Amino acid sequence: MSLPPVDPNLRLRARATATNVTGRFEPYGREPVHDGWDIPEETRLLRTEIRTEVPRKALTRNTSPDVPFDRSINPYRGCEHGCIYCFARPTHAYLGLSPGLDFETRLVARPGMPELLARELSHPKYTPRVIAIGTNTDPYQPIEGRHEIMRGCLRVLSDFNHPVGIVTKGAMITRDLDILSDMAARGLVHVGISVTTLDADLSRRMEPRVPAPQTRLRAIRALADAGVPLRVMAAPLIPVLTDHELEAILQAGADAGAQAASWILLRLPLEVAPLFKDWLQAHFPDSAAHVMNRMREMRGGAEYDAEWGRRMRGQGQHADLLAARFRVACKRFGLGRELPPLRCDLFARPPRPGDQLSLF
């Protein structure tokens, strides 16, 4: 059964979903209803809205046992890339907004983040460990071109000699090659570029405002040529739709200069599952049941399993086969090594105006 559409007088351009499903914390749902008048209404294009937020803190802490970091930065809330499968969509419900179209079109920028980050890193009790950026929403989504919050954060991290790991689908990362190459020379940065498919048409359907696959591969090449250690990420792998491309994606990443690789199985938490199923019915009606049946096989009979250690990989025969294919492909394409460890020993608070400078 399809989810209710938004106002039929709205024109959607390059949006993954056509619905604004109510968030799980809202007491009431909303559906467009014809007012009974035969007077045609003027259609209007649904545009991206951006508001700013004054963040209370820059660093978000986590204790998840299946991720390799304990702190992260999120310059934006929501993501204009609009990936239909994005596991971060449910976070918009905390703002009283929909994980559907609101997640793609009603965004929050946090321009004070670089200054707040510098303040937190300057605290006498702060101990450096790798900061992850891009683990929730993409720091290089289109609005970064206007706000440059990510670039400001990178400047701060570079000034403090602080290690950072970045995950993105955005080719805009090449804009910051001046900072990234300098940090890479000091052993302070890793980058992961997500390539979900090499099929440009499929990419445009399921991640409508993400740079095309070949553009992302060119970004990998530019980063590699600048000496930035990076991995190609086959993430997420979608059963039936993209899992057959695993080897091709890894080979393309290796050919572009990636040094390592990773993969993650499609995740459908909370509101993401109905949105994804609605999208499947609209774009791939003949394959929708096959995709979801395979997902359930790999999730212990459910559409999603949030258990630590299983949420990224799944379980069962098909999940084991994907893992085996990944290991073989990494060996074949020279992606089986780990990226060099990032350095925490260089961390130093830069002098501020008025500070007493050292003689040595």
Image (spheres, grey):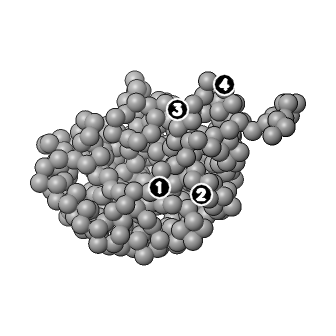
Please tell me which residue is depicted at 33% across the width and 62% down the height of the picture: 336
Could you say which is closer to the camera, residue 41 or residue 164?
Answer: 164
Please tell me which residue is depicted at 53% across the width and 38% down the height of the picture: 129
Q: Position of residue 81 (x, y in %)?
A: 50, 55
Q: Nearer the viewer, mark 4 or mark 3?
A: 4
Q: Nearer the viewer, mark 3 or mark 1?
A: 1
The residue under label 1 is: 340
Could you say which is closer to the camera, residue 339 or residue 305?
Answer: 339
Q: Amino acid at mark 1?
A: Pro
Q: Dot 4: within a 10 Å radius of its alpha carbon, few (fewer than 14), some, or many (20 or more) residues?
A: few
Q: Dot 3: within a 10 Å radius of its alpha carbon, few (fewer than 14), some, or many (20 or more) residues?
A: few
**Badges 1 and 2: C-beta atoms under 8 Å apart?**
no
Between the C-alphas of marks 4 and 3, the distance is: 18 Å
The residue under label 2 is: 184
Secondary structure at numbered mark 4? loop
Between the C-alphas of marks 1 and 2, the distance is: 10 Å
The residue under label 4 is: 124
Between the C-alphas of marks 4 and 2, the distance is: 26 Å
Secondary structure at numbered mark 3? strand
